[in-house]
Image (spheres, rainbow, N blue to C red):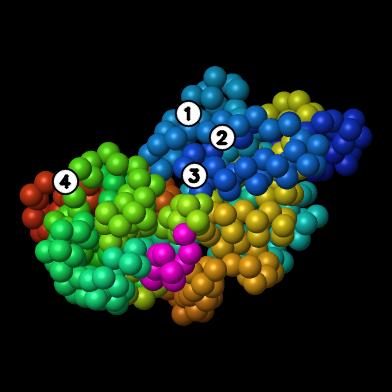
Amino acid sequence: MKRIKLVAVAAVILVNPSLALAEPEAEVLHWWTSGGEAKSVAVLQQEFADNGGTWTDMPVAGGGGDAAMTALRARVLSGNAPTAVQLKGPAIQEWYEEGALADISAVAEAEGWADVLPASIADHMRCEDSWCAAPVNVHRVDWIWANADVLKANDISMPGTWQEFNAAAEKLQAAGIIPLAHGGQAWQDATVFEAVALGILGADEFRKAFVELDEAALTSDAMVAVFDQMRTLRGHVDRNFSGRDWNLATAMVMNGEAAFQIMGDWAKGEFLAAGKAPGVDFLCASTPGDGFLYNVDSFAMFNVDGEDRQAGQALLARLIVGKNFQKVFNLNKGSIPARTDVPLDEFDSCAHLSADDMSASSQNGSLLPSYAHGMALRGAQAGAITDVVTAHFNSDMSSADAVNMLAAAVANSM
């Protein structure tokens, strides 16, 4: 398909004075529908309104964004793309290759994005020589959350190894407490799987397996051990886990029904929205092992007609990467700012741990994109891996068979 180079929204404003006078409008498609997420996106809605914009909300719940992407495809095919869409990772490049994205380079250059965003994050926001998306935050994926009172009552510390986790889980199970709150949805299975994989494989082998798709890494004995640990974890979730939304699993930890949850730091947003305090009501730690798996939320602006909508895109892009929004949004969402120049004075201890670990991981080469959350691989490859993970988690399949299936699925998806 011949790629159409779209004129930068802000550049249009400069050469078309009538656009500068247009009232900014934006129809925004996203999947932030839980308590903490809805509170976070409301921050952007309010800031957009305060700057004279009219926001039309298009939330699509479910599937960790899968349902939203289905809705997006239908809208684009009908010739009625939303103004802005929550989009990330290789999906941004895929839509760019279809000629669907607007060039927001004029906004990015005017606001100096290249000077305030980490290079690895900025790379995800660029399409060839243009800027095509605006980053909102940096989520860490490989977190373990715990109910502080439950752990204290059972004389359990936050686990530093998977062996320690397994021992704690057995102790909790004997006490009648669900060790691991989990929702049986494919993306949640994948989230737990990649956290386990990072801890057992290490950063280098994780990169080979889930970024480079190296066959030797995918079929190693260490990968068999990853599936072995997943089988152990399957024995520590409750029987009603199938289909449960992630935020309901977080609520199980909040109310003491379960002790742990393995989930990205959007879970912290749920704790905070419920008035819970880190270090008091809940505990946070990276999952066992070294490294940092990141998931960056961002918004891409789609090719739309109309001066009002184009003005809305320019305003949204500017606000999203603005220092105020980056601070206020991430305080609510549980993540940390994508900008490196936002002070963290008002952020909690978990956020400081995340920022420190991200900096250290960036320096030692263990800062890695999440495959489970669309940062490392395109849809076909990521989906092939997740299908195997979920099939193994929900059956009696052996770990050796899962590894063989994994290699075959990846090869067939190429």
List the residue tagged with mark 2: 29
Query: Which of marks 1 and 3 precedes in the sequence?
Result: 3
Identified by mark 2, the residue type is: Leu
Residue 411 visible in rendering: no
Q: What element carries label 3?
A: helix
Query: Which of marks 4 and 3 precedes in the sequence?
Result: 3
The answer to whether the residue labelled 4 contacts the one labelled 1, judged by CB atoms less than 8 Å apart, is no
Q: Is mark 4 on a helix, strand or loop?
A: loop
- Label 4 neighbourhood size at 10 Å, few (<14), some (14-19), many (20+)? few
Mark toward the viewer: 3 or 2: 3
Identified by mark 1, the residue type is: Ala
The answer to whether the residue labelled 3 contacts the one labelled 2, judged by CB atoms less than 8 Å apart, is no
Q: Is residue 398 left or right of residue 284?
A: left
Query: Which of marks 1 and 2 precedes in the sequence?
Result: 2
Outermost residue toward the right in this view: 17
Q: Where is residue 331 in the image (x, y as percent from the top left)?
A: 59, 59
Q: Picture quarter containing residue 348?
A: bottom right
Query: Which of marks 2 and 3 precedes in the sequence?
Result: 2
Query: Which of marks 4 and 2 precedes in the sequence?
Result: 2
Marks 4/1: CA–CA distance: 32 Å
Q: In this view, does 144 lie to the left or right of 99?
A: left
Identified by mark 3, the residue type is: Gly
List the residue tagged with mark 3: 35
Identified by mark 4, the residue type is: Arg
Residue 345 visible in rendering: yes
The answer to whether the residue labelled 3 contacts the one labelled 4, judged by CB atoms less than 8 Å apart, is no
Q: Which residue is drawn at 15% across and 58% down?
A: 176
List the residue tagged with mark 4: 239
Which segment did they paint magenta?
Answer: 276-286
Marks 3/4: CA–CA distance: 25 Å
